Amino acid sequence: MPRRRRHDDERENLERWLVSYADFITLLFAFFVVMYAVSSVNEGKYRVLSDSLVAAFRNITVNTEGPALASGTMAPLQAVAPTLPKPVVTPRRNGREEEQRRQVRERMRTMAQDIVQALGPLVKDGRVRITEGVKGVTVEINASVLFAPGDANLEPGAVAALRAVARILAKTDFPVTVEGHTDNTPISTAQFPSNWELSVVRASSVVRLFVDAGVDPGRLAATGYGEQRPVAGNDTAEGRARNRRVTILIESPLPDTPAELPARPTDLS
């Protein structure tokens, strides 16, 4: 009996190496798994993980080339969408609107040509200037044609010319603004304490004649600017003569096409 017990103990000792071998194989398998995982890790993610661990254990803020991670409680990040400029939308006109605009431009051009013909002699000698622009047709008449110096009563010779212009305006429906202008020579009389009063009354005299000639008063306006809007220098006699004028602005009814300005994009840097 004792010999048999020793034989069983020896056989059990011989099979015990299998446990160690199995542990070794398991560790070796785990080692290869870890090596494979380390070989395929993303460098950026590894750096972020490393910084996070350093910040967590040292309780400091780590700032490297990667994303900045700080210890402690942080507010949740919110995605900020960049503000893009609004596209400028130009309204598309149909064929009917384009035809209406073309007709208005043609009517204004015809009216301007009629005024040039009516004031032909004054246009030739430079005392009347007629221009056409975006705002409409402008008729600039030298004050010497209309008034005596320092006076706001129309000269008899000017009445016929202004009535010819009024007959042309009466056939249209365009708004008309009459502006009075002077040079910088001071004036101080009982009737005109300054150039403001003189310029306004001169413009009103022209408007009153237009009304008497049949132009709708609702289309007329009078304003005076004194010497505040010169078109030439006041240091010469020629410049002062040019600045003494009455301007008749025949406004275009075509509306401007507004364009919305885009907002500047937000700088996210």
Image (cartoon, rainbow, N blue to C red):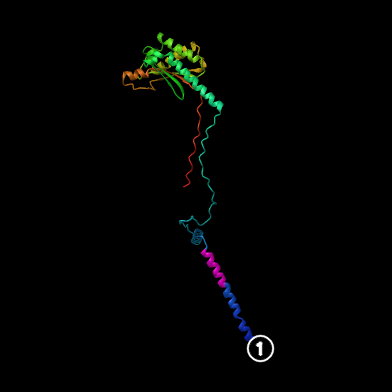
- Does residue 260 appear to the left or right of 131 in the view shown? right
The answer to whether residue 185 is seen in the rendering is no
Q: Quadrant of the N terminus?
A: bottom right
Main secondary-structure element of the magenta-colored stretch: helix
Tag 1 residue: 5
User: Which class describes the residues within 10 Å of circle 1: few (<14), some (14-19), or many (20+)?
Assistant: few
What residue is rendered at 62% in x and 82% in y? 15
Locate residue 268, reporting x and y percent: 48, 46
Q: Is residue 249 above or below residue 43?
A: above
- Does residue 236 appear to the left or right of 141 in the view shown? left
User: Is residue 195 inside the magenta stretch?
Assistant: no
Q: Is residue 37 above or below residue 8?
A: above
- Given residues 2 and 31, the one toward you in this image is 31
Question: What amino acid is labelled 1 in the image?
Answer: Arg
The answer to whether residue 18 is seen in the rendering is yes
Q: Residue furthest right?
A: 1
Locate residue 43, reporting x and y percent: 49, 60
Boundaries of the magenta span: 27-39
Locate residue 141, reporting x and y percent: 40, 16
What residue is rendered at 33% in x and 18% in y? 238
Circle 1: element type: helix
- Does residue 109 appear to the left or right of 16 in the view shown? left
Locate residue 266, reporting x and y percent: 48, 43
Q: Residue furthest left?
A: 236
Residue 139 found in image quarter: top left
